[in-house]
Amino acid sequence: MTPPSNEAGQSANALDNLLTESRTFPPSAEFADKANAKADLAERAAADRDAFWAEQARRLSWTAEWDQVLDWSGAPFAKWFVGGKLNVAYNCVDRHVEDGHGEQVAIHWEGEPGDSRTITYADLKDEVSRTANALSSLGLVAGDRVAIYMPMVPEAIYSMLACARLGLTHSVVFAGFSAEALRSRIDDAEAKLVITTDGQYRRGKPAPLKAAVDEAVAQTPTIQKVLVVKRTDTEVEWTEGRDVWWHDVVADQSTEHTPESFDAEHPLFILYTSGTTGRPKGILHTSGGYLTQAAYTHHNVFDHKAGQDVYWCTADIGWVTGHSYIVYGPLANRATQVVYEGTPNTPNEGRHWEIVQKYKVSIYYTAPTLIRTFMKWGADIPAGYDLSSLRVLGSVGEPINPEAWMWYREHVGANRCPIVDTWWQTETGAIMIAPLPGVTACKPGSAMGPLPGIGAKVVDEAGVAVGKGGGGYLVLDQPWPAMLRGIWGDEERFRDTYWSRFADQGFYFAGDGAKYDDDGAIWLLGRVDDVMNVSGHRISTTEVESALVSHAKVAEAAVVGATDPTTGQGIVAFVILRGGVEAGDDVVKELRDHVAKEIGPIAKPRQIMVVPELPKTRSGKIMRRLLRDVAENRQIGDVTTLADSTVMDLISSGLNKGS
Ligand code: ATP
Ligand code: MG
């Protein structure tokens, strides 16, 4: 076996460095000139970190100033802005109205069937106040937990903000999850109320939703009320005394509500991670530090300008991205944003571009899975719309393959818009690693470096930073304001999961592999659990996938390591071909050779299987553990968090025919 081309000598690396990328895209002079973040931001953060974060916290309105920026004496449990008091919802809503911006649109809401609503900040203040009054009338008091199980309707956002306003801790559960997933999350958090809808639109058709709540709640001892928004006019079963209609209890409430101040460390929400790797964890976030970093990053990473930009984050509120970059960050920054209820191909594959054109969206933030889907659908679709309003593009959720980045830049961003690849997690609460669009010369596929005020490094097994060109484990070496404050009800799991791997150094271990390139830019290489070991070489799934996606015939690829008698593990690739390409032995050979040429013979897949679909979580991430089961001819594991559970049958049946 030939060693990989450029890393043969670096045995200290926990991960080999295979793929190189030389293209760079600096911001235009004009963009740089007008950008919110200039190069001095990093200098200020480096000079005095506490003072820097205090300066960021002043983006918000506090009713009591903090006495201490950070108390890390109880590490790994952080306290930020100790003694400070604020109301999160007041910061996201009321203060903008008081500042004279009540008529500014907060939300251009677009329903899947084509209905729409325009919600100004004044409207938002009224709706959130009504909702808060209603929740109080149902008997909820600060500290109680509320489960929110709703599609992307405005009432979901009112509900989150009303909870924040009252000091209730919300736990949003993605409305595509099952009754069982909802039940376990309700029980774990001991929620008293669930807010839901009668039904939800999915790919153009109404589907029941409350039915799942009925099933879940039948077995949860803590739920007292179920609050139901009418969305689809779907028939529902009704339990008198427990179930209440939104239009009965919210509509008539007063639009006046005085927000109470809460401690900076008051719990704001619990959010269960998506379960890409296993049993979900209830990640706890608090108020002051979280909102500070959400607002700071939204302002600087997206270069957001209040009153000018139209911002659109395509996430669902069921994920952390929807919390930090639909609800809290943008609203704290007085954004005008688009919120879209439905799927990207309803009624056709141009839906997103039609919305960009309609509302003149200027900042668009989405996930690599969707970008690769757009690639598969073809560049002629975005080309049919006026996308000239766009000026910043963002990506989050998975490593973005360089070819997908280039496609996004060319076919969506007209080779003009900076692309910010943002690395962060449910646990980090807000963006941690990303370029600053007016400062950084971006490389396709790299999240570049930690933001000013954030400490992140790539280290080896021993916790020592690897040098330029080296690969290893991504760690966060300093506490940050939006960091999780624990796993709900499980202190030990919190310490074990994140703080035990590099306990001596006190690093937070993110679970992701990463490398530095020769210029010191950070490249995320997927989860450490997915790293393959081929003849002693530690190879990241991401790099092999990116090599495959760089071939003109490939739309998507997922790679896993399967046990191999000679090499320890062998690389098995699952690929989706682009429209019109025929599967066959020729293509497979061509792709194997292509990978060898792109990143070296060591990474040549042992086997390539052409498949129609890949197994993904509801948030669009590839579930490699299921593919590993296929590659190793095992019974397929737990598929409950899959977006489409029939995908595994499709893959298995195709393989049995032999490919
Ligand atoms: P679970 O922790 O339950 O398995 P999850 O990790 O998929 O689920 P999230 O917190 O939504 O849940 O995702 C965070 C993870 O997503 C990161 O740890 C990383 O693996 C990946 N990720 C997010 N953004 C990026 C990015 N820009 N580049 C590379 N990877 C990313
Ligand atoms: Mg995770």
Image: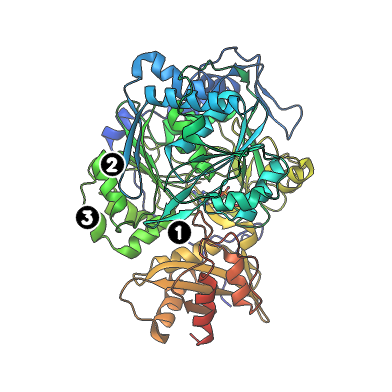
- Mark 2 lies on residue: 390
Of helix, strand and loop, which one carries label 2? loop
Please report the residue visible at 30 percent of the width from the left and 52 percent of the height from the top.
351
Q: Which mark is residue 550?
A: none
Spot occupied by residue 268 in the image (x, y as percentages of width and height):
61, 31
The image shows residue 599, relative to residue 235, as above or below, that is below
The image shows residue 160, relative to residue 386, as above or below, that is above
Spot occupied by residue 191 in the image (x, y as percentages of width and height):
67, 38
How far apart in space, not on screen, are marks 1 and 2 (Cα)? 29 Å
Instruction: Return the disc, 3 or 2, that comes first in the chain's sequence.
Output: 3
Please report the residue visible at 35 percent of the width from the left and 37 percent of the height from the top.
311
Q: Amino acid at mark 1?
A: Thr
* Res. 487 in view: no
The image shows residue 593, relative to residue 486, as above or below, that is below
Task: Decide if ligand 1 comes within 8 Å of the CB at mark 1.
Answer: no
Taking 286 as reference, is 522 left or right?
A: left
Q: Residues within 10 Å of mark 1 (few under 14, many from 20)?
A: few
Of helix, strand and loop, which one carries label 3? helix
Circle nearer the viewer, 1 or 3: 3
How far apart in space, not on screen, are marks 3 and 2 (Cα)? 13 Å
Nearer the observer, 592 or 149: 149
Circle nearer the viewer, 1 or 2: 2
Q: Which mark is residue 20?
A: 1
How far apart in space, not on screen, are marks 1 and 3 (Cα)? 30 Å
Taking 357 as reference, is 236 left or right?
A: right
Q: Amino acid at mark 2?
A: Leu
Taking 67 as reference, is 440 left or right?
A: left
Q: Amino acid at mark 3?
A: Ala
* Res. 593 in view: yes
- Mark 3 lies on residue: 383
